[in-house]
Image: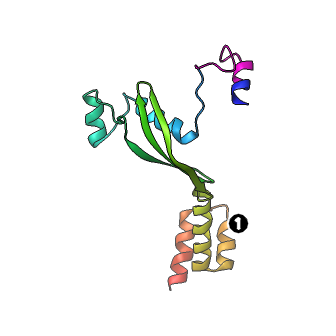
Amino acid sequence: MMRKASFHAGMISGQNSANLVLCLEPEAACMACEDQRNSPLDGAAAAAVATGMQILKNGDTFMVLDCGGGTVDITVHRVVGTNPLRLAESRKPSGGPWGSTYVDQQFEQFLESLIGEDSWKLFKSSSAWGIKLLQNLVLEYLK
């Protein structure tokens, strides 16, 4: 479907063109990171880039954790080529509904249990919906 859409959009000359490589989002993120030579980096990665050394080498295996708003996607890859970067799946991709929105929901439930349902409703309905109101509610609770 993606190849067909790319062909109809004029991005490739034929549906089986070698000029289009489809991959999962975590793979694309990895490829983009490896391709960045002008990004600010620290430590060993900065030293490797400064000397022109590739960070990933043939045979390296690594895990990518793509932590989004709704999900966390986990992939494990093995480097099978470096110019251009080519990856092979080492493990079946995994993940689940553990993204930041769920962390937010759990934190809100914790706050509600800490300050009580009535105070939480007041806080959520307030136009202030800010830290000062929360501080006051927590201080009141701690008295």
The span picked out in magenta is 6-18
Tell me if residue 67 can be seen: no
Q: Position of residue 123 (x, y in %)?
A: 64, 69
Residue at 52% in and 71% down? 135
Residue at 40% in and 44% down? 61
Name above or below for residue 18 compared with residue 143: above
Identify the amino acid type marked 1: Ser
Image quarter hosting the N terminus: top right
Q: Which element carries disc 1, helix, strand or loop?
A: helix
Name above or below for residue 87 compared with residue 106: above
Residue closest to the far top: 13
Q: Is 103 on the left-hand or right-hand side of 48?
A: right
Q: Nearer the viewer, residue 142 or 89?
A: 89
Residue at 42% in and 37% down? 79
Q: Position of residue 9 (x, y in %)?
A: 72, 19
Residue at 33% in and 31% down? 54
Report crowding for label 1: few under 14, some 14 to 19, many 20 or more residues within 10 A (C-alpha).
few
Residue closest to the far bottom: 143
| Residue ID for mark 1 | 125
Q: Position of residue 127 (x, y in %)?
A: 67, 61
